[in-house]
């Protein structure tokens, strides 16, 4: 799973907090509600809205928001990346660990010599 620093590097590479979310989001309104502002998916990430799970166990399947945990803790909280349908931004926010968000795994390529 990507770390907080991985998400910061991705955000900065995609032009900063104000525009990175749009470059990550799937285009159109098949999964995101209108207006899905600034969605270009030029990164190829195809971010989808996943809603969340409240600590009490209730699920909010919401086509307005996308949240992805990072592998980085902040005391009793952990960092997550957030974007929504009405902005093109990508924010890094800390939330209680009891909240449920989506995860995006990162595959590290290892090249083995002689194989």
Image (tube, rainbow, N blue to C red):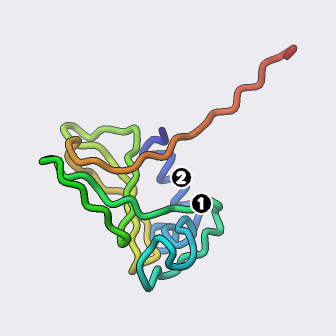
Image position of 6 with respect to 88: above or below = above
Q: Quick one: which residue is furthest to the bottom in this view?
A: 35
Q: Nearer the viewer, residue 57 or 55?
A: 57
Q: How many marks?
A: 2
Q: Which residue is mark 1?
A: 13
Q: Residue at x 58, y 65 (%)?
A: 14
Spot occupied by residue 79 in the image (x, y as percentages of width and height): 33, 47
On the image, the x and y values in percent for residue 20 come to 52, 67
Q: Are marks 1 and 2 in contact (CB under 8 Å)?
A: yes
Q: Nearer the viewer, residue 85 or 93?
A: 85
Tell me if mark 2 has few (under 14), some (14-19) or many (20+) residues whose alpha carbon lies within 10 angstroms of its own.
few
Q: Is residue 63 above or below residue 87?
A: above
Query: Label 2 belongs to which residue?
Result: 9
Point 17% across, 47% down: residue: 57
Disc 1 secondary structure class:
helix
Q: Residue furthest left?
A: 56
**On the picture, is 46 further left or further right than 65?**
right
């Amino acid at each position: 799973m990507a770390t907080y620093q991985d998400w910061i590097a991705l955000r900065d590479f995609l032009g900063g907090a104000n525009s990175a979310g749009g470059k990550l989001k799937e285009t159109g309104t098949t999964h995101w509600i209108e207006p899905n502002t600034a969605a270009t998916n030029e990164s190829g990430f195809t971010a989808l809205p996943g809603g969340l799970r409240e600590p009490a166990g209730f699920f909010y399947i919401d086509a307005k928001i996308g949240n992805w945990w990072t592998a980085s803790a902040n005391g009793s909280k952990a960092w997550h990346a957030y974007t929504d349908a009405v902005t093109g931004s990508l924010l890094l926010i800390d939330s209680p660990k009891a909240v449920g968000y989506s995860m995006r795994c990162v595959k590290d390529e290892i090249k083995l010599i002689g194989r």
